Amino acid sequence: MDDLATLVSGPGLVLLDLDAEDWQAVLEAGAERLRAGGYVTDGYAAAVVAREREFPTGLQTAGVGVALPHADPEHVRSAAIAVVTLRRPVRFAVMGDPSEQVGVGVAFLLALADAHSQLRALRLLAELVSDAGRLQRIAQARTPADVVAALGRQSEHA
Amino acid sequence: MAKRVLIVCGTGVATSTMIADKVRRHLEQRGIDVKVDQTKVSELHRGAQGYDLIVATTQVPASVGVPVVKGMPFLTGVGLDAALAEVEQKLMT
């Protein structure tokens, strides 16, 4: 099923090849796409930056570094994920290890109303994060449709 | 009797939901029967009584008194074998 691809399919939710100075710029750019699409409130951007500062979401995968910024559900109007690919790696602090940093190539900004209604999407996202091949396809995507297609593809591995 | 594992993340339940399923499936594949719950770190002030293990994607205070394993390998796959070995070792002692 395409739950993950559907969450990214709204217009403007895929921002490719962003040239960002720092992680705040990445989050602000992605948050603006979610706000413009009506998926989140005006408060989401500040909330996601504050959360990232306190509980960082950078992850060193087997392939490209990713970040999974998100905020509390009170800022979410309807579920969506903004995908931001970066022209050059941007340093994020590492989830669970804030003294460590990782160069991130793809950020997935999650606007999820509550985890239980988005269970399948979250599980698919977890599979994606451990799939270096699909992450690489997303990092190198030239069009939003490429990203949506990569998200909709199940891993070949069980 | 099933072992009880608590998945802990920073805020909300997005990260812990992502790994809860993976943790459960991996342990069951290893023949370890588990019951998996989720919470966020701010809820841990109540303690973690009754849990045999915590798998966390955030730092957890030592005062919680339950063994802790880092959860990020369940998300990324990097270091997963070592993390599983650590989970098994801490659950079975």
Image (cartoon, helix red, strand yellow):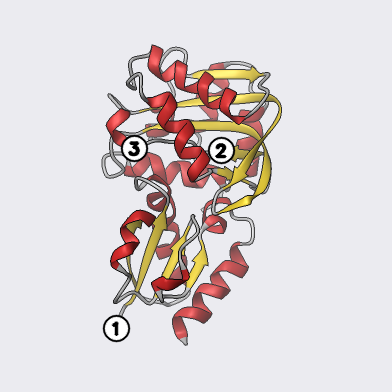
Please determine whether, in this image, residue B58 is positioned above or below residue A103: below
Q: Where does residue B24 sit, x and y in percent of width and height?
A: 40, 64
Q: Chain of mark 3?
A: A
**Considering the numbered disc 3 on the image, is that residue within a helix, a strand or a loop?**
loop
Depth check, front residue: B3 or A51: A51
Disc 3: which residue: A72
The residue positioned 32% from the left and 63% from the top of the image is: B45
| Any part of residue A155 in sight | no
Q: Where does residue A92 sit, x and y in percent of width and height?
A: 62, 39
The residue positioned 34% from the left and 22% from the top of the image is: A40
Mark 3 nearby-residue class (10 Å; few <14, some 14–19, many ≥20): some
Query: Disc 2 versus disc 3: distance between alpha carbons?
Result: 16 Å
Please determine whether, in this image, residue A148 is positioned above or below residue B81: above
Mark 1 nearby-residue class (10 Å; few <14, some 14–19, many ≥20): few
Disc 1: which residue: B1
Tell me which amino acid carries mark 2: Ala
Depth check, front residue: A131 or A66: A66
Q: Nearer the viewer, mark 2 or mark 3?
A: 3
Query: Disc 1 versus disc 2: distance between alpha carbons?
Result: 37 Å
Tell me which amino acid carries mark 1: Met
**Considering the numbered disc 2 on the image, is that residue within a helix, a strand or a loop?**
strand
Query: Disc 1 versus disc 3: distance between alpha carbons?
Result: 35 Å
**Considering the numbered disc 1 on the image, is that residue within a helix, a strand or a loop?**
loop
Tell me which amino acid carries mark 3: Asp
Depth check, front residue: B65 or A16: B65
Q: Quadrant of residue B33?
A: bottom left
Q: Which mark is residue A67?
A: 2
| Any part of residue A3 in sight | yes
